[in-house]
Image: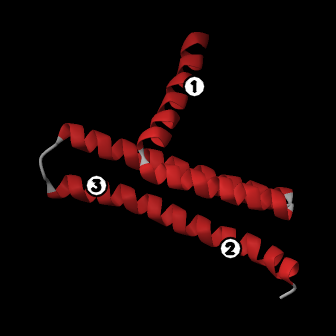
């Protein structure tokens, strides 16, 4: 049982590697995540703010991974053009969009007071 538990982590890290290596949008999200974390370090975010930022980053990557999985499965199962497959892929992409936009808004809500203080607005 222990071996399968550890293998699960290896498979998950392999999936994360595939996500970053092969998905352009995931690389953009990785860049945005590093920017958000760097800004958090510079502005000395509070622990609760860090928690929210990191949860947003995790949610975006989870949605991106699920979207990529849906796309790959759909393409394998039904490579020809199909309206239901297109809908499924578009819905998965919409999930990434919703999580990304809400995460950006949350980031703005967290960072704006720091910018106001820093620039004395």
Q: Secondary structure at mark 3?
A: helix
Callout 3 touching callout 2 (CB < 8 Å): no
Residue ID for mark 3: 88
> Which residue: 45% across, 35% down?
18
Left or right: 91 in relation to 36: left
Circle 1 is placed at which residue position? 9
The residue carrying pointer 2 sits among few (fewer than 14), some (14 to 19) or many (20 or more) residues within 10 Å by Cα, namely: few
Determine whether 2 is above or below 31 in the image.
above
Which label sits in the foreground, 2 or 1? 2
Label 2 belongs to which residue? 108
Q: Is residue 70 visible?
A: yes
Per the rendering, the mark at residue 119 is none
Q: Is residue 1 visible?
A: no
The residues bearing labels 1 and 3 have C-alpha atoms spaced at a distance of 28 Å
Element assignment for label 2: helix
Return the x and y of residue 13 as percentages of the image width and height. 55, 30
Cβ atoms under marks 1 and 3 closer than 8 Å? no
The local secondary structure at tag 1 comes to helix
């Amino acid at each position: 049982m222990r071996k399968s538990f550890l293998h699960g982590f290896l498979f998950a890290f392999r999936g994360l590697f595939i996500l970053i290596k092969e998905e352009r949008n995931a690389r953009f999200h990785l860049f945005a995540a590093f920017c958000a974390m760097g800004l958090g370090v510079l502005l000395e975010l509070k622990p609760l703010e860090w928690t929210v930022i990191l949860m947003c980053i995790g949610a975006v990557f989870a949605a991106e991974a699920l979207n990529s999985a849906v796309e790959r499965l759909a393409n394998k199962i039904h490579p020809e053009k199909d309206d239901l497959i297109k809908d499924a892929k578009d819905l998965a992409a919409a999930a990434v969009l919703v999580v990304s936009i809400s995460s950006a808004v949350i980031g703005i809500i967290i960072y704006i007071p720091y910018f106001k203080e820093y620039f004395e607005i």
